[in-house]
Image (spheres, rainbow, N blue to C red):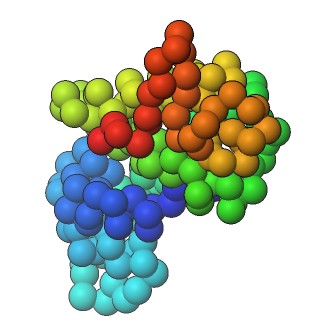
Amino acid sequence: MYTTASQLLDRYGAESLAELGGQKLPDAVVPECLQALIEETSTSGYTVQQIADAQAALDAITAAISDAQHFIDSYLGKHLTLPLDQAVIDTSVIPRQAAIIVRHDLMIHGADEQTENNYKNAVAWLRDVSKGMAAIGAEDAAQDGDVASGFGFRSGGETRDWDAFG
């Protein structure tokens, strides 16, 4: 798996995830309730409606994670053998790129400029990986032999470092 709800919680925080996951709901999602569901801890302090709203937000987040996985696979599968080993995924920039894609896809009312730019950079990186111009990590780079860093690529004599994109 390229990213999980727990990793998104660590990266973006409960408040941001509750807002993103609950955009289609009539009531605001209680961030702490969503966090409890993600972490599989007690929800006894929340109402049935709060738990239902948090579960609906978590379902939206989980669906976006699945969509991002398929989207990423459509690019990676052109150059790499899928499924990738989890150890390769964990040492690559794929989890970060997946998180960016999930966040962008959850922004149903339009992404802010930074999120849009991050998304465009993630898709450009995926496109480069699919063409063999970028590597996902050291093992992939060693196989291709044309990328010095595990997280960069060369194009027209110019080397780009995808880790530099925030």
- For residue 91, side relative to residue 83 (left or right): left
- For residue 74, side relative to residue 103 (left or right): right
* Image location of residue 47, percent across then percent down: 25, 78
Quadrant in the picture for residue 101 = top left
Q: Is residue 56 above or below residue 42?
A: above
Which quarter of the image is occupied by the N terminus?
Answer: bottom right
Question: What residue appears at the point 28 percent right and 58 percent down from the top-left corner?
Answer: 12
Question: What residue appears at the point 75 percent right and 25 percent down from the top-left corner?
Answer: 78
Question: What residue appears at the point 74 percent right and 32 percent down from the top-left corner?
Answer: 145
Question: What residue appears at the point 40 percent right and 86 percent down from the top-left corner?
Answer: 41
Is 138 or 148 nearer to us in this picture? 148
* Image location of residue 115, percent across then percent down: 27, 35
Q: Is residue 47 above or below residue 64?
A: below
* Image location of residue 160, percent across then percent down: 45, 27
Quadrant in the picture for residue 6 = bottom left
Quadrant in the picture for residue 155 = top right
Label total for image = 0
Is 68 or 126 nearer to us in this picture? 126
Which quarter of the image is occupied by the C terminus?
Answer: top left
Is 39 or 80 nearer to us in this picture? 80
* Image location of residue 76, percent across then percent down: 68, 33
Inspect this view and state whether residue 47 appears: yes
Inspect this view and state whether residue 53 appears: no
- For residue 152, side relative to residue 18 (left or right): right
